[in-house]
Structure formats: C-alpha cells, structure tokens
Image (cartoon, grey):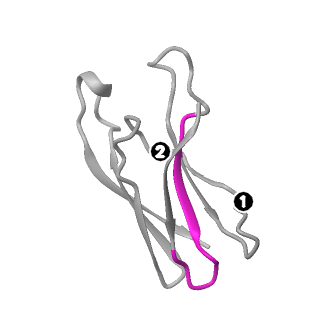
Amino acid sequence: GHRAEPYLLKHTSKNGVLLWTDNRSSEPDLLSGQIQLFAAPVSEQLRTGEEILVPHARFIEGTSQLQGTEHGGNVLMLWIDERHGFGIMDPKPELWFETLWF
C-alpha cells in the first residue's frame, strides 16, 4: 500500500496542514480493503505531527479530489466520497466535508 493524493494547505497557527489518502491498510481482497483519509499538522522542521484519521471517508483510489482550507483555526476538508457506491463497477460519488480543529 501507499499514501496518495497529498494536499498541503496554509494554516494561521501551524506551518501548514497536510491531508492525504492512505491505502496501506488495504487487504488483498478488494471488498475488505479500505482507503483511509488522514490529516496532520506540519512543524517548523517540515515534519508531520500527530496524524488524525477521518474514519468515515470512503474512496475509489485516485478519485477523491481532496481539497481543504483553513478558517478561524479550523480545517475544512472536501472530497468525493463513495460511501453509497459499490466500487468501480457501481460508483455513486457524493461531495462530503469534515471539519478538524488544530
């Protein structure tokens, strides 16, 4: 597995916040695998801090179009989610968003 679709956003109290999808938890069986969504602050040494998992995100690899912005210290994330679809054979893309506090 690997990390994919990185998105670095500017943050007023951090050097930035990195968002990415991660399929390192994937299973050999396609129905068991899951691509996860993570976010982490970026330090002055350009290292990521503690990772935050957004456990309810569902993706088809490479299709999330992950984006984000900072507003008042909050990170607003937006992505294309497949929670009601059945993979590449029956996709049902929806726009979803989540707010994280840093």
**What residue is at 52 percent from the left and 77 percent from the top?**
10
**The magenta stretch spans residue 87:** no
- What residue sits right under mark 1 in the picture? 50
Q: Quadrant of the C terminus?
A: bottom right
Q: Secondary structure at mark 1?
A: loop
Q: In the image, what residue type sits under mark 2?
A: His
Q: Nearer the viewer, residue 4 or 56?
A: 4
**Location of residue 91 (image quadrant):** top left
Q: Nearer the viewer, mark 2 or mark 1?
A: 1
**What residue is at 63 percent from the left and 84 percent from the top?**
13
Vertical side of 1 occupied by 76: above or below: below
**What residue is at 23 percent from the left and 25 percent from the top?**
90
Q: In the image, what residue type sits under mark 1?
A: Glu
- What residue sits right under mark 2 in the picture? 56
**What residue is at 37 percent from the left and 35 percent from the top?**
60
Task: Tally the marks.
Answer: 2
Residue 13 shown left or right of residue 83 in the figure? right
Q: Residue furthest front?
A: 45
Disc 2 + disc 1, Cβ < 8 Å: no
Q: Which residues are magenta?
A: 10-23
Residue 86 shown left or right of residue 74 in the figure? left
Disc number at residue 101? Answer: none
